Amino acid sequence: MDLADNEINMPTKYDPTAVEAGRYQQWLDEGVFKPSGDKKAKPYSIVLPPPNVTGKLHLGHAWDTTLQDMIIRQKRMQGYDTLWMPGMDHAGIATQAKVEGKLREQGISRYDLGREKFVKEVWDWTDEYGATIHAQWAKLGLSLDYSRERFTLDEGFSKAVRKVFVELYNKGLIYRGEYIINWDPQAQTALSDIEVIHQDDQGAFYHVAYPFVDSDVTFNGNPYIEIATTRPETMFGDTAVAVNPKDDRYKDLVGKEVIVPLVNRKIPIIADPYVDMEFGTGMVKITPAHDPNDFQVGNRHDLERINTMNPDATMNENAGKYNGMDRFEARKAIEADLEGAGVLLAVNPITHSVGHSERTGVQVEARLSTQWFIKMKPLAEMALKNQETDDKVNFVPERFEKTFTQWMENAHDWVISRQLWWGHRIPAWYNKATGETYVGMEAPEDPENWEQDPDVLDTWFSSGLWPFGTMGWPDIDSPDYKRYFPTSTLVTGYDIIFFWVSRMIFQSLEFTGKRPFENVLLHGLIRDEEGRKMSKSLGNGIDPMDVIAKYGADALRWFLSNGSTAGQDVRFSYTKMDAAWNFINKIWNASRFVIMNLGEMTKPTLPDQSEWDLADKWILSRLNATVKQVTDQFDKFEFGEAGRCLYNFIWNDFCDWYIEMSKAILTGDDEQAKANKQNVLAYVLDQTLRLLHPIMPFVTEEIWLDMPHVGESLVVADYPVAHPEFDNDIAEQNMTSVIDLIKAVRNIRAEANAPMSTPIDLGIQTDNADLANVFETNRDYLDRFIHPKELQIGPDVTAPKLAMTAEITDAEISVPLNELVDLNEEADRLQKDIVKYESEVARAEKKLSNQGFVAKAPEEVVNAERAKQADNEAKLAATKQRLQDLKDAQN
């Protein structure tokens, strides 16, 4: 059989569009993504972090889901009973903001529609973008079990949410109260602390004089005290001025009264340890309705709470003439009026950190509001205590456990109510007549006398139940809950440890008594080539679907799996995408060659070990090492290391060496040797495709189905395992010596610019009899790759006087120079070099003999010239000696 004469349908170039077309639907039709149902198999489950139904998936989603798919595909092939549960998140504030933005473009608001019609609009949005996300999951090749797909607002999940709320309320862990909360004036809803992003804004310190009520009182000779504030628009809510009780500067002022400018209201000067004596003047205004610290001070001193703003951050009736003005416009007007009243002492521009809404981007207001809260201390303590047990959650990388611990140790009560229409309605009703509060799983029996709380729950409240709520809880007899919970591994970004990971942990411990997952693998962020975070404002975002259209899903998955180590950010690069495509094309072409040379084989069957040649022993030992290393790295979630191991084995060992070494046998006349080689090639390719499949499922399936094999799909094929009988250190050592020899001779040829195909005399001096025997018994490989005309191997081999040499372990290689170059041409070249070096030496001698140059030039310049002279003199001497040796050899 001639090389490559077996007909197959593989094109000469890898075409990802053709390879991936229809494959995903075929997998779905075959049902290969569903759990095996084998009760004897060990279960392994992952819940997909539910993407928000706010738009298309981005590269971060692609990275996150690729890692999960790799894990679940490998575990499925390893015989686990696997479940990968898909789902989406209703994403309350984010989705409502998107739909409200869409309505604003039409000139209407949610209030024009009313709650019921607005919620229908959001459901329509959800259906549209849910379908888009499904299509993107398919493009990425995610092996999800869609028969179990969940949504955070579906009825079963809503039941779990209500049960958790009711039980926490009955335990006294949920309460309703008036507190200072973070307020988003655009979305007009409360925010939790971690939904506030702090960034530097330009602002100012406004220094304002607060006159004493008693005209006889002065301070530092002035009839007023000086108060500095960054937010003069909140002055109308001032109810006190505070100083530290230990501050001797102000001890005589405590109990006095001052007047709030522009509103002329009297407020007391009080003493409270909250005040920092070292900051500013050590005297601060207290505005209990607009600052969380002031709120606490106000509680201690029974101060009035005066709210000066409406929910949309316009000023209200308590702001007097500024009623109805936007907060920032009011600030400008107040500044002008303070100056006109002669009480604005100074305005000092500053840059300071200001909270902004994570969702809408507007500046957040600290606002007095009645909200629902969860008491975090007992739940956090329980989560921290569990981390000291064998049932702890294992963080990967481990350093992120410290991040989790620090947040739990400092967790504040969590405001869980949101002033939205899209989400889980709070299961609380208020009696219209008595004001009594009822909290329950269902509405009161006489609903006409009760009014449900209009607010909804924070999205993170419901998504915190995701690992067990998706499994059928609170029905603890649910088959999925009993079989697959706790889940095995969670994969998510390190940026939501606070938002989501921590909340799943304490919710799960509280309601199931178990950790939600055994491991949490935390990855970083996708950045652009310059290391910048991808954002709309920078215009540097990359659509993963565009990348797939150009390179294919497998190339994107390969890049994402090899991009970085766990917990680190990764930079997207089209250069790296080109390299990923090239690697797959290498695999494609190597596979095509192997398959085209398998003859009539029906199934790869390894020949008896007695028939393995050195290359067979070596490649099977290398395969074994690769299986062990890749499996170990997957178990440790070190996917980058697993990828590097696979790359080196496939590109270097299998393609560059083993396949090349096989060609001579495949074209030879020894049919038994040919059959043996075909079987080893097919076996190694089969095992390699299985190893690769979790990372690049489409192309491996396409190639595998073109091979002679038993099985319908790689998705459910057995994952490779190590075979102790394949381990062969001696074969690896011997083949390494052969490869080193071939590389050394190739380097000599390249250095001499001699053709690789021209036969040459070759000497190998070695005192190692075993090594000499390796070279002797593998003369076929040396003949094919080195083309020796005459080959000498042994301890007595001496290198000719004119020869190029190289050293490898336990051997010196020599090639006579006349085998590589024309000696007459070489003599002419050396003579020209001598003339050149003599000229350089003469020029330097003349320059250095010039006393003016030596005396006046900088020392480093003179030293450099001397060094150059010495270098050229050495080159001249060496070249003359080489020319003399060449002449001696020719005589």
Image (cartoon, rainbow, N blue to C red):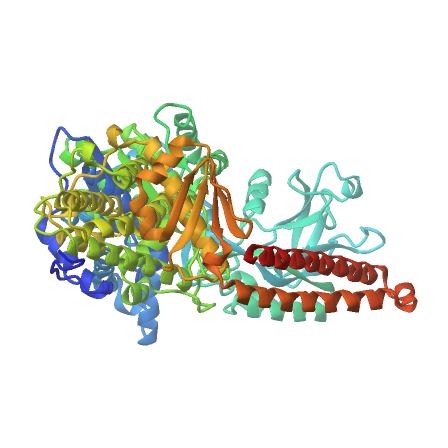
Q: Within the image, what quadrant is residue 679 found in?
A: top left
335 to the left or right of 197: right
Residue 509 location (% of width, % of height): 33, 30
Residue 410 location (% of width, % of height): 50, 36
Which of the image's four quarters has the N terminus? Answer: bottom left
520 to the left or right of 479: right
- Do we see residue 666 in this rendering? yes
Residue 471 location (% of width, % of height): 20, 39
Viewer-nearest residue: 845 or 486: 845
454 to the left or right of 522: left
- Do we see residue 440 in this rendering? no
In the image, what residue occupies the spot 86% across and 63% down? Answer: 858
Q: Residue furthest front?
A: 891
In the image, what residue occupies the spot 43% across and 45% down? Answer: 565
In the image, what residue occupies the spot 48% across and 38% down? Answer: 403
In the image, what residue occupies the spot 36% across and 23% down? Answer: 390
Residue 631 location (% of width, % of height): 30, 37
Which of the image's four quarters has the C terminus? Answer: bottom right
Viewer-nearest residue: 195 or 598: 598
In the displayed structure, 126 sits above or below 634; it is: below
